[in-house]
Image (tube, coloured by chain):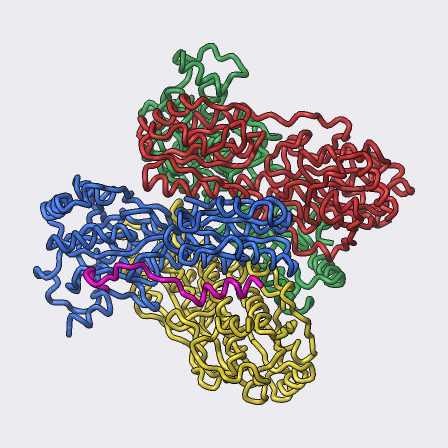
Chain colours: A red, B green, C yellow, D blue
Amino acid sequence: MEEQSKQDHLCKDQPHPNRRGPSYPHKMAVLTAGGDAPGMNAAIRSVVRVAGAADIEVVGVQRAFEGLLFGKFTPLPSRAVANIIQRGGTILETSRSEQFRTPGGRARAAENLHYNGIGALVIIGGDGSLQGARALAAESDLKVMFIPASIDNDVPGSDFSIGFDTAVNTALDAIDRIRDTAFAHERLFFVEVMGRDSGFIALAVAIAGGAEAVVIPEMPIEVEELIRRVEESQARGKRSSIVVVSEGPRTGGAMKLANAVDGRLGDAARVVVLGHIQRGGSPTARDRLLASRMGAGAVKAIVDGRLSSLVGEHRGEIIFVPLTEVPEKSRTLDTELIELVTLLSL
Amino acid sequence: MEEQSKQDHLCKDQPHPNRRGPSYPHKMAVLTAGGDAPGMNAAIRSVVRVAGAADIEVVGVQRAFEGLLFGKFTPLPSRAVANIIQRGGTILETSRSEQFRTPGGRARAAENLHYNGIGALVIIGGDGSLQGARALAAESDLKVMFIPASIDNDVPGSDFSIGFDTAVNTALDAIDRIRDTAFAHERLFFVEVMGRDSGFIALAVAIAGGAEAVVIPEMPIEVEELIRRVEESQARGKRSSIVVVSEGPRTGGAMKLANAVDGRLGDAARVVVLGHIQRGGSPTARDRLLASRMGAGAVKAIVDGRLSSLVGEHRGEIIFVPLTEVPEKSRTLDTELIELVTLLSL
Amino acid sequence: MEEQSKQDHLCKDQPHPNRRGPSYPHKMAVLTAGGDAPGMNAAIRSVVRVAGAADIEVVGVQRAFEGLLFGKFTPLPSRAVANIIQRGGTILETSRSEQFRTPGGRARAAENLHYNGIGALVIIGGDGSLQGARALAAESDLKVMFIPASIDNDVPGSDFSIGFDTAVNTALDAIDRIRDTAFAHERLFFVEVMGRDSGFIALAVAIAGGAEAVVIPEMPIEVEELIRRVEESQARGKRSSIVVVSEGPRTGGAMKLANAVDGRLGDAARVVVLGHIQRGGSPTARDRLLASRMGAGAVKAIVDGRLSSLVGEHRGEIIFVPLTEVPEKSRTLDTELIELVTLLSL
Amino acid sequence: MEEQSKQDHLCKDQPHPNRRGPSYPHKMAVLTAGGDAPGMNAAIRSVVRVAGAADIEVVGVQRAFEGLLFGKFTPLPSRAVANIIQRGGTILETSRSEQFRTPGGRARAAENLHYNGIGALVIIGGDGSLQGARALAAESDLKVMFIPASIDNDVPGSDFSIGFDTAVNTALDAIDRIRDTAFAHERLFFVEVMGRDSGFIALAVAIAGGAEAVVIPEMPIEVEELIRRVEESQARGKRSSIVVVSEGPRTGGAMKLANAVDGRLGDAARVVVLGHIQRGGSPTARDRLLASRMGAGAVKAIVDGRLSSLVGEHRGEIIFVPLTEVPEKSRTLDTELIELVTLLSL
């Protein structure tokens, strides 16, 4: 009876008549895939602890899909996830696997899981790993729950991905430092942040960092327009300017932009490429909370006998989107924020 | 025409035919009231910059309501708010005023504003200041917009208040440090955080910090129950325990709890009272964004000729709640989070 | 030959003819004792790695002197200390042992070490542990090297102890936050820092934090004098004041001082007691460097056949003070710094 | 003799009968030159406050030597330096001036100072500015005191320069973040830090960050040797490697090294160039203390009638080196540290 009430905490808002039957797996696996993101460890911890409360045994898969293929399974008792909530990276490591992209590879992965008595799998990863999760769920009878973790925040189906808030704050800390020196020297800086295909980080950092302009994949800017905007800002008396640029071919990157304006905006522009420092670091409170809630949600979805789903956050609440219904396309930027950058830099 | 399109950015979702007429004030004031919160400066900056884009002149009121009474007004051109987005505290200062709590005081405040040609006022503050805003709006023809800023996150009408995210991250940083030493010494710590009447900070910090238990005003815990929980946690092999406690008479505070368990849980419990360090510091990205969006929303509401309103965030979006309709009671805690604390500490 | 040259790195400035003979132990132990301090892990890592380069096997002792008595030894290969340099606390834990304070207890500890073939011991700890190190060295034929680690910085024989720099920066971060709110509200704050018997932390924090006054054990201040100084500062136009106070009976602590001035300096004074957050956190670069150098020095001293010594830093260089010659009394404060506090707060 | 002893205590509490005589200037100027460094503001504040205590009026020069030439002087009363000790950058700005490099330019600067009744000048800057200070002192009767501020720590005559400790800690924070992701992915990272002509930052960061290797101008490494070292480290079971590289032509920079090893050490190496984020940020406690002590020392030197000097720190103490005697060559690296990097990465 006590166990019953514990589970009630997690799923009291819907009936789950078959909860006590053999209908949900009593052994599950968890892995982290794709680029690492701060908060992945908090999600692993939550999966393990909440599964423990529901008497589900948890096994960790080392090195993502590669580990599935080669059976790199390791038991994850409650103690194994002590003292990891604050750590960046992932204790399960991550890697890329070409073989898992083939139906044969995925069949082998499912076989390995079955052989070990594992009926459900939680995948914590980004946009690319979502494809793998979808295929694995479609081609096997495994219950697959997907938790979006990506500093780029570009996983469809969820308003936020784990790691985004930390990455933005890390980049913001760098911007704050750069402004100190930009102001001291009256200089123009181009700061490149992550987000090859989406401007979420760049936009948030630009607003929060008080940047003069932002260049993002969704809305590339003409060099002449950029020059005009910086000149206007200088004409209004601004003595230093920071332009935030998303990485990648669609914007051209910070270095290319700096070269393009060279000599036309006073002193030589400086370039800072933040790169991989945005991936690491202790996760923020928001990322730890989000990871904890999503981890609990994934276990709850398994206990409730839901279809294989993406466990996301939408409008502040945990939601479950069946993997077959997750949209293909990434989320789009909020136009409210795009307009704010310009207004606030006036 | 260009000005027209600029304003469109802010309020394109509704018609506002009378925008160019005398229908909205062309001079407004902004003040910060109550306890200071990180992000207040970001909100001031946003008000000033967005008002500037709408050709509204902005005046800063020093020392909150006291400044209204004594006419401590200072012009806030765009340059005056440069380089403040990252600063804690408030450049306008804050203070308490008994006189403003009387109708006579408020009449004098309104008179001072009128005398200076100021037709609208943005108040950035907490629960207490909301009462003042409501009264001033009811008793005068001033347009009053209220932006919730409170590390306690207990302002009714908005899911989040400015400063909450920063305060939680500050307290979390402290918890992370304490766990280092708790673990090294196998100790029990009681950590007191802010939130006299609400457990928002305590709950978020407890989950994100991996605490063993949380004691909050909304749900005080029996000492015996607390002892039982810590003992259980020790029985499961945990070598250190952290209990997060909201300040104030309803929980009794960390010191009282530590004394109550004294001698019953191994070594003497240690007490840490985080206190005012939770109020300061450079705001997080989330608080700067929220402040920037709310500041823009307040100006937009004035331009659009809305009723005097609270400018809040609900389910991720900026909302406007007429001051006459803001509920009296504070928001309640999410039970999902309360349950998570226990599940995750297992 | 290659090994020879490696050792040369560490001790090339003196002859050590007996280095290759049986004259130095080829198995050593390391432990952390007393209050934990950030950088202890960096010191452990350095001992292990440098000993490895000299072909000395290293064993970790869990739980300080208690572990010596009960033989809680664990091998520490090079991999065991990977990824710990940045962690606060100590992977070896620490504890207090009454039994070790008796000659019988120490004899048993020495016996345990001999039984395990361990001829040398590195103790990383504070003032109290130094007494234990001294007694153990005097009463046995063990080679004992002592590395000072204490956030209070009060270990005699060394200008600096591991952990001090981190603790000062942690306290400083808190002061910076408090000043934000002190300034916003025009308030008086008493901030209590660690250092029961010495004002090192308080003095450094007061100068670096721009405090108005400091109260330390070495130089308690009269309440009237303190009031006079704050009043003077207010008369000069300062709108907020921060007084840094060392904890403990000699100063009375922040709360007692706040009560003593109550009602005499405007609004009620606020009290912040930083407490144990000063012990934790990732060590600063300086503490990691100091710990790495002292750890290397301790191994070098063993290889060189030195007498049992304290491995300290004096005037920027690593020094070796025979344990029999370490002064009893703590180091005294630099009067230059005491005067600076007053001058700078003008 | 009497005057000599006065130096001990900054002359506040003793009589110094000749203070009001013509023996030392009663109006002085302060400027910051060259690249900005965290702690410059703390030095300005200290100069102003300590001068105030000695009844010397202080004037700030905007934009370094350019400001000297064009008389950009602004009074700096005590209040003007309130609340700046924690800020990065410099409130006085900095810039480069070709004209000041000519004797004619310097004559004009001296003339401007005389015309304004300014008899002494404190220059806070780096290696390049030291030349200007020296020339100005030699060619005029101004009293010139030079305070070394340079994140590269390469100013001759002082063991440490203001800003170095902060820059090292900033770079270290980045390294800690990168290691999270390096470990998660088993990757090789090249991290480029500042220090075109000197490896001080790189060396400190490499040791404190637990890097596998360091490449510095003073001791460039062969690519083959670097590959051998990383391979050895991988053979010992290390799954990720970080190589810290000083910027500039003498090492070739991180990108060039990464290209050189490309394809020979497993997966593609990643490159992170920390760049200007190392210049900014709130100064560490050590940098604020150093700046405060040097600022006080500079004023004391003027009051004491010393020759124009560099105010440095040597072996923990403030020293005064006459500008004519400051060595031309930069300080050299400590070989103890160079050896430590290799030993500790084993």
Q: Position of residue B37 (x, y in %)?
A: 47, 42
Q: Quadrant of the C terminus of chain C?
A: bottom left
Kindly indicate the quadrant of the structure image that contains residue D164: bottom left
In this view, the residue in front, A260 or C325, is A260
Residue C164 visible in image: yes
Residue at 26% x, 59% y is D328
Position of A299 relative to C332 (above/below) = above
Q: Position of residue A18 (x, y in %)?
A: 89, 38
Position of D201 relative to B41 (above/below) = below
Describe residue B273's horizontal placement relative to residue D124 as left or right.
right
Judged from this view, the residue extending furthest toward the right is A21
Q: Quadrant of the N terminus of chain C?
A: bottom right
Q: Is residue D327 magenta?
A: yes
Residue at 67% x, 82% y is C117
In this view, the residue in front, C191 or A18, is A18
In this view, the residue in front, A262 or D226, is D226
In this view, the residue in front, B143 or D318, is D318
Q: Where is residue D277 in the image (x, y as percent from the top left)?
A: 43, 45
Specify start and end residues of the magenta stretch as a single range. D321-346
Q: Position of residue D232 (x, y in %)?
A: 60, 59
Q: Is residue D159 magenta?
A: no
Describe residue D270's horizontal placement relative to residue B339 as left or right.
left
